[in-house]
Image (tube, grey):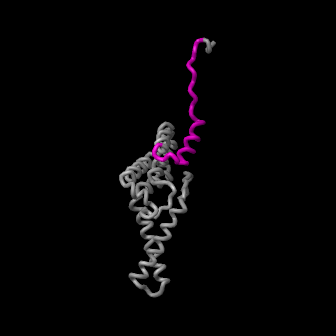
């Protein structure tokens, strides 16, 4: 399905290293425990186990996040907001999963799932025309994640479109 909704994925290359190590370890464990015929089979089976874990963990643990992304791509922003809020709440309760996302979820994302959830909620509010709610969530993102590049950039983009405050009218100015 093609989507006109833009998505940004920030990869932290240092977080790829634990994933490579996990892949190598899974190959080594398969070779040591199962002793398949030849190292080639160990590589294939170890990689298969790694992929099943990688895909499965994201589908199970980050299901609300994935659902929010899917709904956003479909233009169902109100429903997406609910899913991103669920994702935010889950990762706030289980912060260790978010901090160790490179190993637990095999996700090399440069930003946490909580930050992604807040930015995505703000984006969805913006798409619904709720500028104040969008600003509120981008600001909340910056409160929790002061270095959030996406929140800073989004707030800068919103500023020029805000209505300037109108001076109080006086009888002298109306003549």
* Horizontal and vertical percent position of residue 4: 57, 52
Q: Residue furthest bottom?
A: 37
Q: Seen in the image, is 130 located left or right of residue 171? A: left
* Horizontal and vertical percent position of residue 122: 49, 44
Q: Is residue 55 above or below residue 88?
A: below
* Horizontal and vertical percent position of residue 113: 45, 54
In the picture, residue 67 is in which quadrant?
Answer: bottom left
Tell me the residue at 49%/36% (across/down). 132
- Magenta region: 143-171
* Horizontal and vertical percent position of residue 94: 37, 55
Q: Is residue 121 a member of the stretch shown in magenta?
A: no
Tell me the residue at 47%/39% (across/down). 136
Q: Is residue 47 above or below residue 63?
A: below
Tell me the residue at 44%/66% (across/down). 55
Q: Residue furthest right?
A: 175
The total number of labels drawn is 0
Q: Is residue 124 above or below residue 110?
A: above
Tell me the residue at 57%/31% (across/down). 163
Comparing 94 with 62, the one in front is 94
Comparing 130 with 9, the one in front is 9
In the picture, residue 173 is in which quadrant?
Answer: top right
Q: Is residue 12 above or below residue 122?
A: below
């Amino acid at each position: 399905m093609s989507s006109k909704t833009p998505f940004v994925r920030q990869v932290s290359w240092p977080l790829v290293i634990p994933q490579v190590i996990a892949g190598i370890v899974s190959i080594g464990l398969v070779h040591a425990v199962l002793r398949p015929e030849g190292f080639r089979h160990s590589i294939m089976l170890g990689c298969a186990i790694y992929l099943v874990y990688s895909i499965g963990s994201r589908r199970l643990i980050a299901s609300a996040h994935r659902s929010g992304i899917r709904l956003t791509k479909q233009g169902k922003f109100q429903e997406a907001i609910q899913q991103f809020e669920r994702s935010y709440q889950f990762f706030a309760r289980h912060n260790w999963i978010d901090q160790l996302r490179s190993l637990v979820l095999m996700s090399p994302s440069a930003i946490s799932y909580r930050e992604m959830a807040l930015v995505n909620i703000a984006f969805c509010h913006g798409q619904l025309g709720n500028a104040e709610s969008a600003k509120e969530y981008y600001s909340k993102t910056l409160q929790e994640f002061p270095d959030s590049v996406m929140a800073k950039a989004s707030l800068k983009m919103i500023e020029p479109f805000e209505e300037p405050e109108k001076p109080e009218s006086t009888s002298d100015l109306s003549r």
